[in-house]
Structure formats: C-alpha cells, structure tokens
Image (cartoon, rainbow, N blue to C red):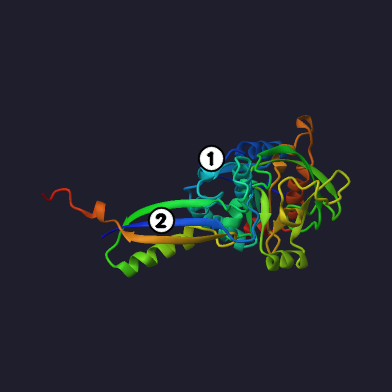
Amino acid sequence: MTIAAAPQVAVVVFPGTWSERDFADVADALGWQARLAWHTETELGRVDAVVLPGGFAHGDHLRTGAIARFSPIMRAVEAFAAGGGPVLGSCNGFQVLTEAGLLPGALLRNNHLEFRCDWQWLRCERAIGPWLSSLAAGDAIRLPISHGEGRYFADDATLDDLESSGRVVLRYADASGAVTQAANPNGSLRGIAGIVNERGNVLGLMPHPERASDAELGGDDGLRLFRSLERWLQEQPAAAERL
Amino acid sequence: MRWLAEVHVALRPGIADPEGETIASGLRSLGYRTVSDVRAGKLLRIAFEIDEPAAAEAAVEEMCRRLLANPVMETATWELRADEQQDADPALP
C-alpha cells in the first residue's frame, strides 16, 4: 500500500491573469503542490492537473484568449490535454480553451453588455470527468461569476452534438436547480455555463470555483470540483505517470 | 513593396450583436427613426511589406485565418492596396 502523494497542479499565468493566486491559495489549503507556470515556459513539468485561471490574458485585446492561445506554454497544455490530463479553464481560462480549439464554441459579449459579478446558481447536468466526479446530475451549486464576455455561442450542429454526447455539464440555473431564461446571466445559448471535451478531461466553465472554496468567503461549493480531482486522481494511480 | 490592408471583422450574420443593437437604439433616440439595424465590428489597418502582389493577398488571408477573426463567430473581409505614400524612399530628392 502506498500513500497517495499530494496532487501537483500547474496554474498557468498569462500577462493579465488575475485568479492564479486564488487557485494557489485553495491548493495550499487542500495540501496540494501548486506551481505558477508563466506563459513563456515550454514545459509543465510533472503535474497531475493544469488550471487556466480567470483574468484578462494579454488585455483580452482582439478577442478574449486570442493572443494567449499562441503562448509557448499552450503547446504543453495541449499535449497534456491530449494525453488525457485533467485541465480546468475558468472564466478567461475557458475563453482561452475555446480559442485554442481544446473546447468547441466561443464566448461572446454578455447580451446586456454589462460586466456581471455576482453569485450564480448552476445545475450539474452530468457529473463526468476529473473535475465533477464528486457531484451528481441534478445537483445545484452556487459559484461566483465575474465576466463581461461569457455568452456561450456555438452553431446549432455543435450545440446538438454537445447535448447528444452529454458534454454540456453545467447550466445557469436558479436556486432550485431549474434552468430558466431568468437565471441566465449573459445570454448563453441553451444556458450553457460549462462544457467538457470528448474525453471529458478538459472542463471549461465561466464561473469561478476558486472564489467559492472557503465558507468564510460566502460559499464553498467550488471545493466540490477540487475534491472531485482528488478522488479522480486516487482512482487513477497512473495519472501522475502519464508524462 | 509596402501594402496596406484594411480588415473588417464582424460577427457572423444571425449572431446577436448587443453592441450594434445598443448603437441602433441610440441613433433612433436621436431622431433617426428609420434605422433598422446596426452591426458593430472592428477595423484593423495593417501595414506590411511583401514583394509579390499575390503573396500579399495570401498573407492577409492567412493573418485573418490564424489570428484576426475567429471563424466560430466572426467573418473577415478586407481591402488591400499598395501603400504608395510610404513606399517612396525619403532619401531620394
């Protein structure tokens, strides 16, 4: 019997990223080893998971994530994702993942043109992959959102494919978990707040789980995503050997 | 040879454009009541050097495809012309 090592997580930092320290704080609190990986680096090192945090990478100029996707570190993130490694992109990180083609669709300006910073209920549609394994379909969780460009868009064929393959994992909802137009904070098509890739190892979501990981700060539903990763890693002892 | 490309990037037709809708509303409130639609976009003016005219056109197409527009939600159109003014050699009399 071996004692599971603390998860090693790389938190990618672009110029303008703003949530990396919040992720690192959560990792510290959980006893993980978190390393901030600057965008010009070419290697992630031996890690169990990668986080692309929120912020405004490269000032969000041209389009959100448009410049960041060409950063050297993204070649390593793409290789890690291709190998099945757990990747979490939150907010701007989600935008970077769509620009990089690791997730389909795009995030457009909120339909009301306002930057929206608020608590938001979400319905878990499918508890798959390393980041959601501790949830169950139908669960309602409460996380902060903080974005001006979170309106999920994809063409109808892509949306239908996401739905039929069970890759829409989080939708904006009310406190009861009901997905309604009134609960949609940005005009996202079909209320989509989070999706995964075909293998399920790459999760992109607009909300911020790292900002809801301490009950003293208003809520800790975000911890469920990080606990999911711990559980997933324990079930897959070879995960750390992948690289 | 110097070239000047003016690239227009816009949301694909049919995608809700709240910025354009807000501008249209502003125009109507100023009295331009017949304004039915405004689509907002970006204008990118790109100066560059390349010898062959065909290569210049291809370069702009490639810039649009690789970076300037995201085909998931945007279209790019452009006008390309020789940048004669800046092509003149200031050292000549």
List x then y, in percent, for residue A55.
Answer: 59, 41
User: What chain letter is assigned to the residue under label 1?
Assistant: A
Quadrant location of the N terminus of chain B in the rendered image: bottom left
* Residue annotated with mark 1: A16
Image side of residue A112 versus residue A215, left or right: left
Q: Quadrant of residue A105?
A: bottom right
User: What chain letter is assigned to the residue under label 2?
Assistant: B
Instruction: Say above or below: B71 vs B33.
Output: below
Real-space Cα separation, disc 1 to disc 2, in angstroms: 28 Å
> Mark 2 is on which residue type?
Glu
Q: Is residue A47 visible?
A: no
List x then y, in percent, for residue A165.
Answer: 75, 67
Q: Tell me the mark number nearer the camera, choosing from 1 and 2.
A: 2
Instruction: Say above or below: B27 vs B49.
Output: above
Residue drawn at (49%, 60%), measured in percent from left and top? B76
> Mark 1 is on which residue type?
Gly
User: Which SS class for mark 2?
Assistant: strand
10 Å crowding of disc 2: few (<14), some (14-19), many (20+): some
Q: Which mark is residue A144?
A: none
* Residue annotated with mark 2: B6
A95 or B82: nearer the viewer: B82
10 Å crowding of disc 1: few (<14), some (14-19), many (20+): few
A71 or A104: nearer the viewer: A104
**Outermost left residue:** B93
Does mark 2 fall on the same chain as mark 1?
no
Image side of residue A75 versus residue A168, left or right: left
User: Which SS class for mark 1?
Assistant: loop
